[in-house]
Amino acid sequence: MTSSFIYGTLTVELEGRIDTTNAADIDKKLFELVDANNPRKVILDASKLEYISSVGLRVVLKLKKTIDDTTVVNASLEIYDIFSMTGFTDIIEVRKVLREVSVEGCEIIGRGGHGTVYRLDGDTIVKVYNEGEPLDEIEREISYSKKAFVYGIPTAISFDVVKCGNCYGVVFELINADTFANRLCAVPEDFDSYSVKYSAVVNKLHTTKADPHIFSNIKELYNKWVDDMAKYYTPDEIKLLHDIVNSVPERESFVHGDIHPKNMMVQDGELLLIDMADLTYGHPIFDYAGIALTHVVSGRNDGKYTKAVIGIEAEPAARLFNNMIKANYPGRSEEELKHINDTIMSFAMFKYAIAPAVNKNQSDELNRRLLENTRKSFFPVAAKLIGAVDF
Ligand SMILES: Nc1ncnc2c1ncn2[C@@H]1O[C@H](COP(=O)(O)OP(=O)(O)O)[C@@H](O)[C@H]1O
Ligand SMILES: [Mg+2]
């Protein structure tokens, strides 16, 4: 019986047939492994399992009772049927084997922070995640995309999680079109009409209610990031950051987390939002802060950075942001708009201040400069942000 133990997880490969002839033996070996490693989680890898009879199922049940977080993975359709017809899939999580997809010879149509996107055929793409990205995060992207789609957020249809060599992938409908970033660069004369559409998609997202039982609260995520900054900031500074987050009014609308022109596609003149892995719910300020950071703040020192990250130049990027605030906060006085704008810009500095926690692989040099800037220009005025989000 092949097994491995890492980070508290015991993985055991089940092989061949498990029936009356060998179940007792397998039971003994399994529990020896459990006793030796004291795992928090057990994964039973069924890729080589051909058959399991009722005595075998009882061994699995006993294991599940001992270690509650026990799952069966890579079950063939036949094995899955046995688990499901006996009602076992109600008691224990059983995952079917993932379809293998080869991207050999497929055209690369995009790259992002999480992986590479290939065209599979005329209708579908596969987003292949970087090696080592955990399966539950990938499954989250697919389930969130599906939810967003049925809620009416314009996005690509997602199909299934697949295996591509050593990596996982997600198959999506091919949006046979360019990114919004490329389109804006190619047809600058259409800027104004696209700017209106860009604001409208963001507004649609922010006026759609997300189910809090399915999605997480963005404030929880921010509070976690703030905690992760404890090695950089003093306890007083950490407390101030928490106070700012906690003072933001609760909302139940969708927050995307990474809105920019490379995460939008243009299809038949309409904008579709992609890259839904970080969908949460909460106040739109959290999205606007990110938009302000990537569209406006990033371009102040170095315009090249804007182009590299969001695919368009700093000047049109800042215009997209300004137009969006005006369009999505209609009927406000000049003074109110200025308050909204100032608060979002300060919140952008907040997001910048916690960037090392959000982006764990940022370079030390970048983090050093970031901390210096934050101490100089954010912390002296940060307390003003407490309660400032009143719109
Ligand atoms: N459904 C799709 N149809 C066509 N192109 C896509 C699709 N999804 C992603 N792309 C392309 O791949 C790029 C990266 O995809 P994205 O989901 O944003 O990945 P990441 O999470 O790595 O940022 C996009 O900017 C776009 O060019
Ligand atoms: Mg992306």
Image: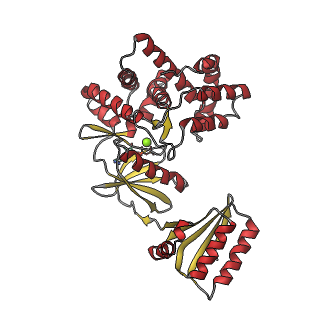
Instruction: Please state the total of marks drawn on the protein image.
Output: 0
Who's the residue at 51% across and 61% down the image?
Answer: 166
Q: Quadrant of residue 376?
A: top right
Residue 282 in view (yes/no): yes
Place residue 218 in its image quadrant: top right
Identify which residue, 390 or 193, lies in the foreground: 390
Q: Quadrant of residue 358?
A: top right
Q: Is 278 located above or below residue 128 in the figure?
A: above
According to the image, what is the colour scheme of the structure? secondary structure
Q: Is residue 239 above or below residue 339?
A: below
- Name the residue at 42% across, 55% down: 170
Residue 362 seen anywhere in this rendered image of the structure:
no
Find the residue positioned furthest to the right.
36
Residue 46 placed where, x, y %? 54, 73
Instruction: Please identify the residue farthest to the bottom as the structure is shown.
Output: 21
**Left or right relative to 179: residue 71:** right
Q: On screen, 72 above or below 161?
A: below
Left or right: residue 249 versus residue 230 is: left
Q: Is 306 situated left or right of 34 in this image? A: left
Locate residue 241, reporting x and y percent.
64, 27
Name the image quarter holding the N terminus.
Answer: bottom right
Residue at position x 35%, y 29% in the image: 199
Residue drawn at (43%, 27%) of the image: 295
